Image: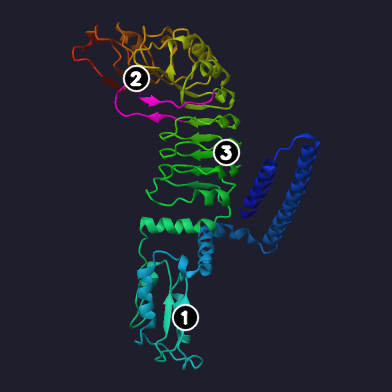
Amino acid sequence: MEEALKAEDVLDEFLYHLYSVKRRSGITGFLHKIVIFMWKRYETVQKFKEMNHEIKEIAERSKRYDLRHMEEDHNSHHSINNAHNIRETAFFVEGAELVGIDEESDQLLEWLTSGENRGASSPSSKWVDKRYVVVLDDVWSNILWKQVTVALPDNRKASRVLITTRKEDITAYSYGAGSQVLHSKRLSDDVAWVLFCSKLCYDMRYLRSFSAFNVKEGSNLPLNNLILRFRLLRTLELIGGPIDYLPKALGKLFNLRYLGLKETKITELPTSVGRLCNLQTLDIRNTLIKALPKEIRKLRKLRHLLIYVGAAGEGFYIITGLKVPNSIVKLKHLQVLNCLEANSDIVKGLGELTQLRRLELTNLKEADERDLCASIDRMTSLHHLLLMAKDENQYLRVDQLSSTPLVLRKVTLVGRLDGVPGWFASLRNIVHLHLHWSQLTNDHIPCISKLPILERLSLVNAFGHDKKEMCFNEGFSRLEDLYLGHFPNWLSLRSVKE
């Protein structure tokens, strides 16, 4: 396992250095890049040769000592050994760096330094005239105590034996008269956070993912320190964290695949975000960001762009899209795009994103109909579609859509409709249908009722004020959830049975 991580490190380092080479123009720049490439390639090859040699040695030792039968034991004790390795770093920590143990350390010192003689054991001529303190660290069996106690004399010198353990049966063992047990207390959230931040510089050689959820306000999240030290991070997730900006150093995370900033107080992304050339997912939902920088166009591997701001209640604006540069349509690998504020250029260019599986657009105008429908017609993999008009008085024109993708499962239309679009009949696999502020004048329930696997239907202010009755006839064979919002008092529901 360790060798595999080393190999991953070497390869990531090689790619990092190649990416970090500053671009220079002309023949000088070309030669500079070639020299760097050849040198880093040589270093990488040498490191892989060393690892190959180490792997061969491991295999030879395994064969020589027939270690195959120990594999199960090795796996079962792997987590314990890792814990031991982590604990060993505590021996090299300065006292000032220890946190959350003031009360316990005071009590321990009192027991260790008091003059009272405790316990009794067989004498040993070697230590009989000496005062001693013996520390047995991380004890897992009482057998150890039985083995060492014969060498620990009770010489009336107030000597002490200190045992640390993580097992309750060790603390419950009878060690003779005067033994004391000090249980470590759970650290408070604030102290635990201070300890965690201090450990960022230790024990994280192979760190690839860092996630922090709902960190308390006022906590000092050392982002800059984290980024600079762990430049090979693949996942950085800070959901609900107390951060309102990202350092420019973010651009150094060449290896980053996932950046999650959901529900933070960040107001903008640094322009250095454009250097995250391996980024696949950017999640900035429900932040204070209003627009994306133009550098977003450089994220050629981006697949999931989650950028909406949700709204509570049943008002027209159930979701707010973000402004994005028109060049967003150049990111050919996008699969999820929710939710962006549309303009005529973006609507026209969306047809280039043929891999889209989820699309959410706001700020649509009646004049966008032709380009919008032409773009959607090219999205054969679309599962989820949300379209919202510019305001509640704007008609959402989608009649020119020739058909819908067979895999389409959820449709949400927010805005006035002249009627149910003709392509509704092609929604053979639709499961969720939401019509908000449609203000339909005729009863289109019979048409909707024919959708064969519809499970959830949401109608919010879906009918005009002159509509007096809504008739539910046959159909809705799979319907499980019907939601009616902004329902006029004078509108009645009627079920007809033939």
Within-10-Å neighbours for mark 2: few <14, some 14–19, many 20+: some
Within-10-Å neighbours for mark 1: few <14, some 14–19, many 20+: few
Determine the image quadrant of residue 463.
top left
Lower position in the chain sequence, tag 3 or tag 1: 1
Give the numbered dot on residue 478: 2
| Helix, strand or loop status at disc 3 | helix
Whether residue 474 can be seen here = yes
Please tell me which residue is depicted at 52% across the width and 62% down the height of the picture: 86
Location of residue 334 in the rendering, given as x and y in whole percent from the top left corner: 55, 27
Which image quadrant: the C terminus?
Answer: top left
Question: Range of the magenta residues?
Answer: 307-325
Q: Nearer the viewer, mark 2 or mark 1?
A: 1
The residue closer to the viewer here, 223 or 55, is 223
Q: CA distance from mark 2 to mark 1?
A: 73 Å
| Helix, strand or loop status at disc 2 | loop
The residue closer to the viewer here, 378 or 254, is 254
Location of residue 157 in the rendering, given as x and y in whole percent from the top left corner: 41, 90
Location of residue 429 in the rendering, given as x and y in whole percent from the top left corner: 44, 18
Residue at numbered disc 1: 134
Residue at numbered disc 3: 272
Within-10-Å neighbours for mark 3: few <14, some 14–19, many 20+: some
Type of colouring: rainbow
| Helix, strand or loop status at disc 1 | strand
On the picture, is 215 further left or further right than 86? left
